[in-house]
Image (cartoon, rainbow, N blue to C red):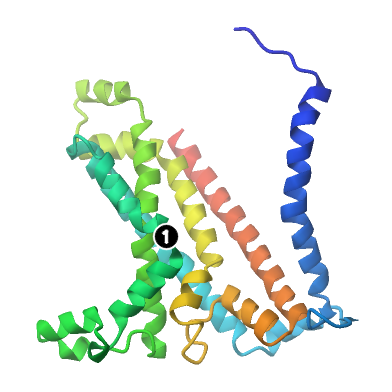
Amino acid sequence: MNVLKVSARTIAVFVVPCLLLYVCLVFVPIGVSLYSGLLDWNGIGTSKFVGLDNYLTMFTNDPVFWPSVRRTLMFAVFSMIEIPFALFIAMLLNRFVKRPNFLVSSYFMPVILSVVIIGQLWKTIYNPASMGGMLNQLLTAFHLEEWKHSWLTEPKIAMYALYFVALWQYLGYHVLIQFTGIQNIPSDIYEAARIDGAEGLKADWHITLPMVVPIFKISIVLAFIGSLQSFDMIMVMTGGGPAHATDVISTHMYNMSFLSMKYGYGSAIATFLVALCLIATLVINIIFNRVEKKFT
């Protein structure tokens, strides 16, 4: 095989500009946020260095912070629950549908829609029956009036209503990822297994699942980290209400930074969110590295 020899200077010419751009767009803002989290600053006027006071207040004297962390983690857990279902759907499509591309594209449609459109659509569905809410009207039609709720205004229910919308929107995204991973498994492996008597569920258990673990990990990381950063859909549908019942870390950070004009405190919350994302990614990678070793 011919190997193209390229000098280090040529590699640097192509790599360094991209690396500098990445540093400027990712690491510099993180560094600025770390520094801003040490300030008492409204984002406009003069700032005052307060050290770790913002973090102490965040951890010990903010009644909204820890509940928002709990909701964010629950959001992340719920987002991972759908991935096994997405894998199951992808396996069914791969096995029983001759031309599955149309179905996969149909499942993916909600992902490419604007979050504002998704949010307004589901706000209309969740409306009370008197305001044309389809869900409550269906419950009334099926004589299930006791199941009717004000889905986005009841504190104990609103967050679960948002979980469902997120699961509905991103199911097709994970179906596409899992389906692509399954499609990339060489067919020769299945043919050899069929000769040895492994077909159907047995082939999926011993071939498909082990070989799709790296793709499964990608879905888990994307779902978990994406849920930790969830913001737009919540702001469109509830704005963090009622009474902070649907506030997550990102919405709380936004409210503190731009509504309460506590930019330094909001930066401290942002720093916590970055750290949480890094820790979550590290833990997921460690777990899946051990899982991959069992199958190799």
Q: Position of residue 22 (x, y in %)?
A: 72, 47
Q: Position of residue 90 (x, y in %)?
A: 29, 45
- Along the line of sight, which residue is nearer the eye, 238 or 184? 238
Relative vertical location of residue 195 with respect to residue 47 in this rendering, above or below: above
User: For the view shown, which residue lies furthest in the top direction?
Assistant: 1
Q: Residue at 61%, 83% (x, y): give it.
A: 65
- Along the line of sight, which residue is nearer the eye, 94 or 232? 232
Q: Quadrant of residue 278?
A: bottom right
Q: SS of the residue at dot 1? A: helix
Q: Position of residue 37 (x, y in %)?
A: 78, 74
Q: Residue at 22%, 36% (x, y): give it.
A: 99
Q: Where, quadrant-wise, is the N terminus in this rendering?
A: top right
Relative vertical location of residue 107 with respect to residue 114 in this rendering, above or below: above
Q: Position of residue 284 (x, y in %)?
A: 54, 53
Q: Amino acid at mark 1?
A: Met
Q: Quadrant of residue 79?
A: bottom left
Q: Residue at 77%, 82% (x, y): give it.
A: 54
Relative vertical location of residue 145 with respect to residue 235 in this rendering, above or below: below
Q: Residue at 21%, 25% (x, y): give it.
A: 194
Circle 1 is placed at which residue position? 80
In this rendering, position of residue 12 left or right of residue 171: right
